[in-house]
Image: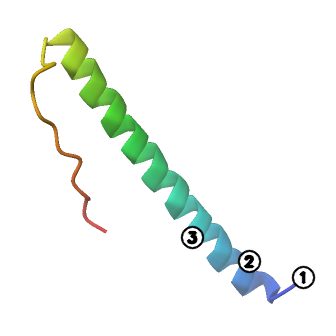
Amino acid sequence: MLGGPRVVKEWSARQQAKALHVGTYEAAVENMLRRMRNQNDLASQFYLLPGAP
């Protein structure tokens, strides 16, 4: 195995963290769009701020 098990484990952890970030960002956008639609917030301004690391 190229790099060994430790390298693979570290790579896997990085990929999982990326997937979590993308999923969280996607959920935030979906919630924002749902609120705009359901609560008639079309004129409101929303901010997507970075979360805690």
Callout 2: helix, strand or loop?
Answer: helix
Q: Is residue 38 placed above or below 27 in the rendered structure?
A: above
Name the image quarter holding residue 8: bottom right
Q: Is residue 8 placed above or below 28 in the rendered structure?
A: below
**Which is more N-terminal, label 2 or label 1?**
1
User: Hey, what amino acid is under mark 1?
Assistant: Met
State if disc 2 and disc 1 touch (CB < 8 Å).
yes
* Front position in the image: 42 or 39: 42
Mark number for residue 1?
A: 1
User: Hey, what amino acid is under mark 2?
Assistant: Val
User: Hey, what amino acid is under mark 3?
Assistant: Arg
| Crowding near the residue tagged with mark 2, few <14, some 14–19, many ≥20 C-alpha atoms within 10 Å | few
State if disc 3 and disc 1 touch (CB < 8 Å).
no
- Marks 2/3: CA–CA distance: 10 Å
Q: Which residue is identified by label 3?
A: 14
Taking the spot 66% from the left edge, 74% from the top edge, the residue there is 11
Callout 1: helix, strand or loop?
Answer: loop
Taking the spot 25% from the left edge, 29% from the top edge, the residue there is 32
Q: Residue furthest bottom?
A: 3
State if disc 3 and disc 2 touch (CB < 8 Å).
no
Q: Which residue is identified by label 2?
A: 8
